[in-house]
Image: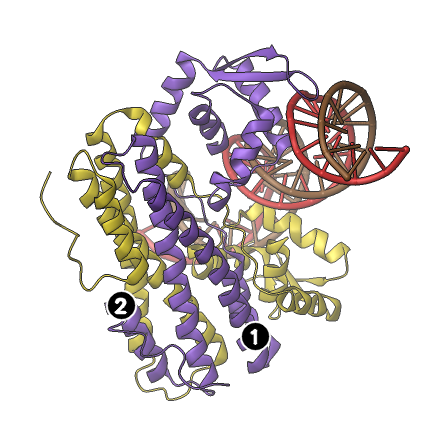
Chain colours: A purple, B yellow, C red, D brown
Amino acid sequence: MSLDHILLGLLREPQSGYELKNTFDTVFSHFWAAEISQIYRQLKTLERRGLLVSWGEPSDKGPPRKLYETTAEGRSELRDWLAGGPLFADRRVPYLAQTLFLEQLKSREESVRFFEQLREEIEIRLKVLLEIDAAVLLEQEEIEVLEDTDFYGQLVLNHGIHRWRALLAWVEESLAILRNDSPSSEMLHQAGDLARHGAPDSALSEGQPS
Amino acid sequence: MSLDHILLGLLREPQSGYELKNTFDTVFSHFWAAEISQIYRQLKTLERRGLLVSWGEPSDKGPPRKLYETTAEGRSELRDWLAGGPLFADRRVPYLAQTLFLEQLKSREESVRFFEQLREEIEIRLKVLLEIDAAVLLEQEEIEVLEDTDFYGQLVLNHGIHRWRALLAWVEESLAILRNDSPSSEMLHQAGDLARHGAPDSALSEGQPS
DNA sequence: ATGGTCATGTAAATTGTTACATGATTAG
DNA sequence: CTAATCATGTAACAATTTACATGACCAT
């Protein structure tokens, strides 16, 4: 399971379950979600398997914290996971299933609205990443060589920017086709060509209003 | 749950659980996975809830088939799902978590290998979609106006092409940076700019060999 | 005192995966 | 007769989500 390995990776530095939850809600939120209850349970399982150790520590506010840290076996398990090569598990994309069934609404307008909502969502996500990117750029303005941690973090950030830009391009393209009602196969494949060879510039997007 | 709604969408035409499984393994395989055992279970639940009806029918080969079809309530449920706007649920991307922890391997070579494996996987996926696209194009060569079903299917196909191309671009970019060892923040942000404004042409990809 | 954040967890329900069981019909 | 495909499902387990329970400490 990937969550286990993520916990092993994060717990190179001792942390509590509560802190881990914050990490998931901030840095990891763009590519991994985890509930606090699941984190607590998984931490216990990993400790039982000897991949983590834990100890209590008093807290400034609230009840005592319980810190976890990766053991040697845990680190070895993590290495195996990474050495096993990249894992794809994002085999469930609801909005694509919805797109396929849009036809059953029998209303071109509702389909257009669907894609407009999609565009809004994507724009928000892209904007968030671009802001983080800008902030990181400011922070690092004077630094010459990056810490490895930051370096891979920047790669992940770049991934998100690529991803949402591509999705946005797809939505714009789809909207342009949708608005030009009674679409012909010619139009679709014109669009397909853009996907295949890359747009010279956004010739299709924002064409004619509905 | 999305699987429920996908079943409701597919069962506008009566089908058996076995047939549905084939649909998931072929057309849906690029964005949705479902096990046959789960399909059978969910069909029962949906029938119990009155969103589907079923009846037996003799089969040419093997045991009798059990066909399901969406009821009026089922169709209404589907409409609500679509009207609720696009759903994002792909919040688990293992290879990005792995990328963040690559730093712990402390071996630039292993990181490069990781990205090369990633590239191979992506190239396979992209190739498959391009082949489907080419086949669809051939099939539709003489047809003027598309059926709505095929139309939305083509949009979903375009999505995949956009998606994998963008991911491939990210991998190439990351590889170029990785191979240029001891990366500076300057290099990373050069790459970031490409992501932000779009590459003029693949100036970065396939730079210097390892 | 009321609500927010800190901090721990358990329990139940749902969803997803893997393994197993059964039996008919057809092609080699 | 053997394997593949057709076709149904159950059982057990694993992963995830949602709801609930508890209590300290801090600011208004």
Mark 1 secondary-structure assignment: helix
**Whole-percent x and y of residue B124?**
27, 52
Residues at marks 2 and 1, CA–CA distance in whole angstroms: 26 Å
Q: Is residue A160 above or below residue D2?
A: below
Is B108 left or right of A28, judged from the image as shown?
A: left
For label 2, the residue is: A196
Report the residue at 74% width, 71% height from top: B72
Report the residue at 43% width, 43% height from top: B93
Mark 2 secondary-structure assignment: helix
A140 and A3: which is toward the camera: A140
Query: Can residue A119 be spotted in the picture?
Result: yes
Q: Identify the subunit bearing mark 2.
A: A
**Whole-percent x and y of residue B58?**
62, 62
**Whole-percent x and y of residue B129?**
32, 61
Is A72 left or right of A66, judged from the image as shown?
A: left
For label 1, the residue is: A113
Q: Is residue B38 above or below residue A55?
A: below
